[in-house]
Structure formats: structure tokens, C-alpha cells
Amino acid sequence: MPDTTTRLHHLEHVMGTVFSFDIRDQPTPAIHRALAHAVRALHTVDAVFSTYRPDSAISRLGRGEIRPADCPPEVHEVLSLCAHATHASDGWFSITPDGSLDPAGLVKGWATETASQLLHEAGARNTCVNGGGDLQLRGQAAPGAPWRIGIAHPLRPGELATVITTEGDLTIATSGTAERGAHILNPHHGTPATALTSITVTGPRLTMTDAYATAAFARGDSSRDWLESLQGYEALALKPDGQTWRTSGFTVHGR
Amino acid sequence: MRRAVLATTGISALIVTLLALKPHQPPALAAVPPRSPLASSSPHTPGSTPSGKPSGTGTYTGDPIDTQYGTVQVAATLTHGRLTAVRVLRAPDQNGRDQQIASYALPRLTQEAIGAQSAHIDAISGASYTSQGYIQSLQSALDQAHA
């Protein structure tokens, strides 16, 4: 049982979604400061990367009003990470998913990972940071107790498709149509990806886990072989007809 | 070494909310007030009094949610942040089809949520929700319990 008396919990509405911080360590002053720092950083990310803000650096860069050299350093970092994701996914991750510059398929995971890292550096060893449905987990839910993460069922609101249990650090990202409709495009054809209703990817760090989930959703069923080829990543896919598939690394138990 | 385990419980699960307003439902149902974390805590589960217990203990009522099956509303009981019971407050009952689906899906949900280890959930991963969508999410219900 988690010791709820020492838990530090925080919600932040930012980046068009909600970030949930769940810190299971004794909340030291350093951890409180790191949490405040992490929250400020999320708002900075929003200001820099939001495509909904015409004055954001990413919007201005996309319109050609400024050059990459004029952007904050984190823009270079994110663009580099996007380039890596595109290369690693055979082009199925796109930084221009709808024709204009939009690194959203990676930014939220990157921002969540950054927030988790700030907490870790401040001494928080057992944390769950949930960035709008994508999670970076560290340590344990309680001494001896693994984290147990429900995967929202994409077709049945309020139900879980499955539960992922992890002992130790893990990241989990889900892409699908349940919340925002068919919003992920096939970058090669520009049409909405519809082969899957959701795909959940697990991996070591959330930036790439998030990007790979986006890419895998766009790619559809053929992403299974691709994901199998990646070291350290596993996936569970749910299809519109109710069928599922998963990569071989998941240890399955239960009924 | 990290170990990721996929606990397959079929379409198991749980939850907390559900429900909604089906298009043909009377407006009176649509007027159900939104949940507030304190006001919604509990009258549904005897013995569960959040105010006198550690954070994460109590009964939390989810918002009514529109589903393809109709309007569903569920209350979740958490003990020390762990889901221990789910009670269905409202299920589709406006026509035969919805009723049939509900009588299958909802009890099953409740039963599994209580009986399966899968009911003990720390957080939820799902397709990216908007700030608005978060309000109806299971993560929202868990956050309320932890707050």
C-alpha cells in the first residue's frame, strides 16, 4: 500500500492537456522546488512549441519568419530528436504531419521526460509523471509494489483494455483515436491512419516512446515487425474489429 | 533490469466514470450537475467517509459520459488510493438494445473491477486527451482520489 501521507500530487493544465505528477517519495524542499521548476518548464515548452499560438517560435519558424538560429536552444534539440525519430521509423514519424511544421508527436513525451528528470535530479526516485496519457515511471509505487498502469480501452470509455505492471523505470505512450478522432495522418499519403484504434508502446525514455507510438499508429499493422526489431520497446495494438496483437517481449500473465 | 508485464485480463476493466447522455435521453438527465471533488464524495458507499480518512480513501462519482451504449455513470471507491469497488449509478435504459448491452457490459465491468487485481491502478495511459477530455477520464478520477 502506498504511504499516502508522504505522497506529493500535483495537476497542471498546460499544453492543451493535463499533466499529473505523482511523487511517492518523502517530499523534501528540493523536490518541491523541482516540481515548481518542472511546471514552469512545461509552460515554457507550451509557449515555444504550441502550434495553436501564432507567436510561438515553432509557428514563426514554420511560417519562415525566423530561422532556426533565431530559436531557443530547445527548438534545436526537439528538431534533432524528431529527425532521429523519422529516421528510426523509416519515415513514419513526420515533423510535418499535415504539411506544416508540427513536432507535437514528440514534444509532449519530451516535455514529460524532462519533467521526470528534474524530479529525479532532486532526489525523487519513485515518481509517475503522466503527460496527457503518456507516462514516465520511475522506481516503485510503494516499497515492494510495482506500478500498475491501466490502458484505456479505445472503444469503451471508462474501461481498461489491459494493465501493464512494471518494476523499475518504464515509459508508456498510447496513440489512438479515442480522444481526438482520426487525427494522426499517414505521412506518406496524407490520409488519416485507420488500421488501428490504439497502440500502446513501452520503452526506456518517453521522448522516443511517444514518437514511436505516433509513428506506429500511422504505420498500422506493419509496425509490428518494426517494433519487434527495436531493442527495449514493446507494443500492444487494438484494432477496430476488437482484435489485438502485441510484440513478443511482453510477459503475459493473468487470465 | 526492467520488467514489463502485460496483465491480460481480457477486456477487463474498470472504471470509474462512464457515461453519458445519449442523444434521445431526456434533458433532465443531461442536467446532472458536474461532479465536484468534495460534494461528489460519497453518499453511495456506506462506511466510506473521505473526510475522516487518509487521502485517497473514499467514493468518487464520475461524470455522466456519453458512450456508444448510452449514458453511463459510475462511482469508484478507493482505499488508500487503490480502487476497491465500482458501483454503477446510471446505465442506459431508454431502449431495448442499450439495455441489453448494458446488462452485459456494466455488471461485468463492476465485477471484474472488484475481483481482479487489475483494479489496483496507479495511473492511466490512453490516447492524448485534451484539457476538456481529461475531465471525463479515469486519470481524472484517480487524481481526485489522490489529491
Image (spheres, grey):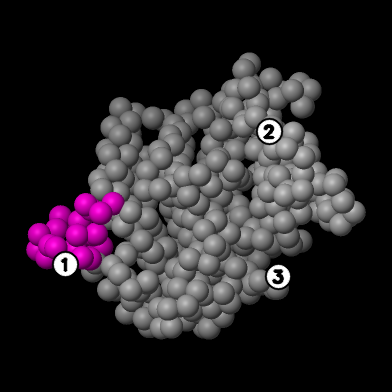
Residue farthest to the left?
Answer: A69
Residue A13 coordinates in the image, percent (x, y)? 41, 40
Q: Is A74 positioned to the left or the right of B62 in the image? A: left
User: Quadrant location of residue A215?
Assistant: bottom left
State which mark lies toward you, 2 or 3: 2
Name the residue rendered at 64%, 72% in the picture.
A239
Residue labelled with disc 3: A242
Q: Are marks 3 and 1 in contact (CB under 8 Å)?
A: no
Name the residue rendered at 37%, 72% in the picture.
A97
Labels 1, 2: one chain: no
State which mark lies toward you, 3 or 1: 1
All told, the count of numbered labels is: 3
Q: How crowded is mark 1: few (under 14 residues within 10 Å), some or many (20 or more)?
A: few
> What span is in magenta?
A53-78
For the question of whether residue B1 can be seen, the reply is yes
In depth, the one of B102 and A36 nearer the eye is: B102
**Numbered mark located on residue A64 in the image:** 1
Name the element at disc 2. loop
Q: Is B68 positioned to the left or the right of A197 in the image? A: right
Name the element at disc 1. loop
Q: Indicate whether A80 appears above or below B71.
A: below
